[in-house]
Image: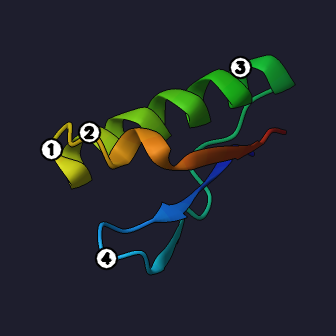
Amino acid sequence: MAHAMISGPLPDGEPFIHMSGDLAGFDLRQDAVQYATDWANDWLQKSFDDSRDASRGSIGIKGA
């Protein structure tokens, strides 16, 4: 099962954490990691509209 956690500071300095919940199931861990990474990058772009603050977050990936 792929999961993603995105964390980092908001523009006002407050901490921010977003956890995806279950994204999808995979037989191979590397497929789960790739899917979660792509999902997290997509989420950051949509949520922060490509702002420079989005790149300061970190992405934690848990694979199958």
* Residue located beneath label 2 in the image: 45
Q: Nearer the viewer, residue 39 or 57?
A: 57
> Could you give the CA–CA distance between mark 2 and mark 1, rounded to whole angstroms?
5 Å
- Looking at marks 2 and 3 on the same chain, the residue that comes earlier in the sequence is marked by 3
- Residue 41 relative to residue 31: left or right: left
Element under label 1? Answer: loop
Residue 57 visible within the image: yes
Element under label 3? Answer: helix
Task: Give the x, y percent position of residue 50.
Answer: 20, 36
Q: Nearer the viewer, residue 16 or 21?
A: 16
Foreground disc of the pair 1, 3: 1
- Residue 29 relative to residue 58: left or right: right
Please tell me the numbered disc located at residue 14.
Answer: none
Foreground disc of the pair 2, 3: 2
Element under label 4? Answer: loop
Q: Quadrant location of residue 34?
A: top right
> Could you give the CA–CA distance between mark 1 and mark 4, rounded to whole angstroms?
17 Å
Foreground disc of the pair 2, 4: 4
* Residue located beneath label 4 in the image: 12
Residue pictured at 70% horizontal, 47% vertical: 60
* Residue located beneath label 1 in the image: 49
- Looking at marks 4 and 3 on the same chain, the residue that comes earlier in the sequence is marked by 4
